[in-house]
Image (cartoon, helix red, strand yellow):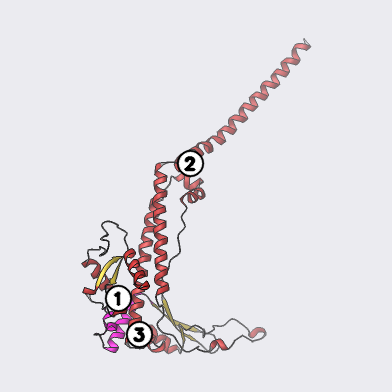
Amino acid sequence: MQYIIVPMLFLGAIGLAIQYWYVSLTVVLAAALPRIIRHIRKQRYFASEEFMALKADIADFVAEHNEVAEYIAEIRNQGSFQLGTSSTGAHAHLASTQNTSRYNYRRDRNVADFRSTNVHNCSLQVVRNASADPLKYLIKYFNVRADEFQLAAAERLGEDISRLEEAIANLRHREEIITEMVDPPAFILKHYADEFMHHVGVELSPVSVPYLVYVFEYVSAGGNSSQRTTVTLDTHALDALTALLSEKIRYRKSAAGQRALMTVGLRQYIKERDDYTCRYCSVSLMDEPHLLLEVDHIVPVSRGGLSTEENLQTLCWRCNRAKSNKLLSA
């Protein structure tokens, strides 16, 4: 009898062990199965035609984005993003200043910026007047002369800034469209976001407009108070500035005077006149909804061309870039 009971106990223990192992295996599989299924779904998604097409579209966008960014850099490097300067701190770099107050009398104070040529240190009254009539005070205190040369520089700067603004706005719009296109399944974003971005491989070159910013600044003698008026020369401000300079010199028959007529409104009119189509390659917004169009002088201003309707044409950015490169190498 004893010899029968021992094997039965042994078999019972084995049965319990098998049952425990089975339960444990079931629990492990139940926990791992969702991950396994999710991994299989992920692999299928990344190998799908839908994802491959998305990658191709994004790659095309990134290539063009970075190409336009390179073009923007060319505009920035070729342009002269400077009009006038303030002379209030012309020799400030020759001196050094430090707060030598002691004990409880030492504290942080407002400090005037004498080293920046785009900052004019002035009285509180000038700061307030500049806020009411910024262009008048910009001309007066930053030595922007009312002559043909300065008028030409202001108009040329306005044209460069306008091209940059339109190019960057075009890129931003494309980025929004790509963002809408990049709409993977929820489980991909939740569990494989990093892997998704690695597969997509988006690397965009940073782009920005180098606006000229002028500052009228007042700082009290003790540094207890300060006020400033800031003037940012965007496209509309530059249009207003060229119009004001033109009125001052009253000289519109020269090339400089004619260039003052090159405004945002005129650029838009030329594009509408040309049916938003490039005069060189005939590509239009109908063909490429996100095509970047620019208004070009047929005879360059540097060679005596005027900003008149018959001397202006619409070009896509690629053709305008090619034309500019030919002129530079000529």
Nearer to us: label 2 or label 1: 1
327 shown above or below 122 = above
Q: CA distance from mark 2 to mark 1?
A: 56 Å
- Examine the structure image and report whether residue 240 is included in the region drawn in magenta: yes
Relative to the observer, which residue lies in front, 10 or 47?
47
Q: Earlier in the sequence, mark 3 or mark 2?
A: 2
Horizontal and vertical percent position of residue 327: 34, 72
Which three-letter amino acid code belongs to the residue tagged 3?
Gln
Quadrant in which residue 86 is drawn: bottom left
Magenta stretch bounds: 233-261
Q: What residue is shown at x 37% (from left), y 83% (from top)?
A: 134
Relative to the observer, which residue lies in front, 324 or 223?
324
Disc marking residue 300: 1
Left or right: where does residue 249 sit relative to residue 10? left
Rendered-image quadrant of the C terminus: bottom left
Contact (Cβ within 8 Å) of mark 1 with mark 3: no
Question: Which SS type dominates the magenta stretch?
Answer: helix
Q: Which residue is most to the top? A: 1
Relative to the observer, which residue lies in front, 218 or 279?
279
Disc marking residue 42: 2
Which three-letter amino acid code belongs to the residue tagged 1?
Pro
Q: Earlier in the sequence, mark 2 or mark 1?
A: 2
